[in-house]
Image (cartoon, rainbow, N blue to C red):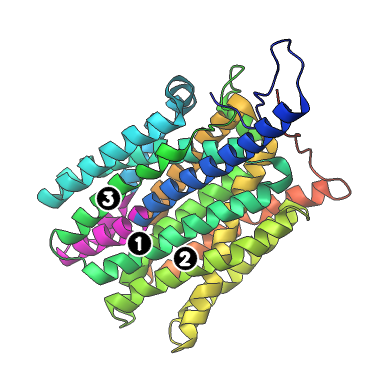
Amino acid sequence: TTLQGHSAGKTDSGVEGTAGREESSLGSISETRRSLGAVIACMAANTVVYGLSFPLLALVLEQNGIDSRLIGLNTASQSLAVFLVAPFAPRLIAAFGPRLLMRACIGVTVAAFGLMALYRDLGVWFALRFVLGAAGSLLWIAGEAWVNGVASEKSRGRTIAAYAMAISGGFALGPFALSLVGSHGYAPFWLAAALSALSALPLVLATAEGRLSGHRPSPLPSILRRAPVPMIANLAFAATSGVMLTFFPIYGLRLELSEEIALNLITVMGLGGIALQIPVGWLADRLNRRLLMSLCVSLSVLTTIMMPIAMLSGSLIWLYALVYGGLRGAIYSLAVVLMGETFRGSDLAAASALFGLMWGLGSVVGPPLGGVGIEVWDPHGIPAVIALILLALLPLPIGSWLRSRGHEPNRPADPPAS
């Protein structure tokens, strides 16, 4: 595996010369930046597909008269696959490298969307969404491990901010693209397949793959005990994202908004995630990251409770969506930063696998809860479910911050250049 910070500037006698050191350092920095940009671009493109496909599939099922609870279960089937593939992810990453693994997952994703366009049967969709979930989970685990493995500790907050901006942009563009092509016919499915295929192109430029191998990784329960805050935060973020992407368009329709406006509100939330990442990343490199997480979760709870009022506020709804999306996006990016500060090498690959499992668990739990919520309290069960999930998360980062006051949590140093 190509390692960040490696030097190649040694003379035949084994003595490292100044010129060789400078040349290798510049080459390493250039290689690292190019690789980070390529992986982030690939992940962003796949997030566009993710942001497009979840509301698309929910709307198609709604148009065909499928019950809300079945829509939630169908969405959850896509996330169930993570429990099958995530335990094998560290071994697969070590064996094939993240780049080859991600390319294979992209190929499976393209085929699955093509088949979904041709076969509109609910039973077939349960199977195909499981396949989509398996490919997407491995892709996500490998990509996040790659980014965190290449990022340096002193700028990790800003690097993850750039990554989270790209991810938020993908979430923003997905519903917007769907609003342009509509949810009827074959076009949105072919668009999702084409975007998936194009996402593989940037990986040609990525050569630095980070330190993702080494000693045998720690067991997943040990990983969870060492870093519960980012893992549970990712679970909560995935659960609320699953509810939002699946049911927010339906929530908007039941409040007599148009499909286009409901989808564009999700786009604006994604733009909010972009706008807030730079200040959050800057703060994450300077402040206690658990305190920052506590503040973002608290404000997310407050703004979620305000959602029913905001949806009836006319033009102010767009400002609300911008702020709300920024706060929720910060929860995810801070979780990635906290994971990266704690783990290195094969443990980072294992932590990314557990991070993916938490995402899968949240995505499995969230949509069915949303379906039950909107049936029990139509339509405001959606913000109620989201607020309850975030409230359940809140004590964890607060408790971790209180325990860490007076000393910064141990952040392992960047590995030395060899």
| Residue occupying the point 41% across, 69% down | 267
Coordinates of residue 349 in the picture (x, y in percent): 55, 30
Q: Is residue 153 left or right of residue 194?
A: right
Q: Amino acid at mark 1?
A: Gly
C-alpha distance separating marks 2 and 3: 24 Å
Q: Is residue 19 left or right of residue 166?
A: right
| Residue occupying the point 39% across, 47% down | 364
Q: Which residue is mark 1?
A: 174
Q: How many marks?
A: 3
Q: Is residue 377 left or right of residue 1?
A: left
Q: Which residue is mark 2?
A: 270
Query: Is 378 located above or below residue 141 in the figure?
Result: below
Q: Please tell me in which quadrant of the rendered image residue 266 appears.
A: bottom left
Numbered tag placed on residue 74 in the rendering? 3
Q: Please tell me in which quadrant of the rendered image residue 312 appears.
A: bottom left
Circle 3 crowding by C-alpha within 10 Å: few under 14, some 14–19, many from 20: many
| Residue range of the region highlighted in magenta in the rendering | 49-75
Query: Is 21 located above or below residue 173 in the figure?
Result: above
Coordinates of residue 117 in the picture (x, y in percent): 15, 52
Query: Is 345 located above or below residue 202 in the figure?
Result: above
Q: Amino acid at mark 2?
A: Gly
Label 2 close to label 3 by CB (< 8 Å): no
Q: Earlier in the sequence, mark 2 or mark 3?
A: 3
| Residue occupying the point 24% across, 43% down | 110
The residue at the far top in this view is 13
Res 66 seen here? no
Indicate whether residue 316 is drawn in magenta.
no
Label 1 close to label 2 by CB (< 8 Å): yes
Q: Is residue 120 left or right of residue 77?
A: left
Label 3 close to label 1 by CB (< 8 Å): no
Circle 1 crowding by C-alpha within 10 Å: few under 14, some 14–19, many from 20: many
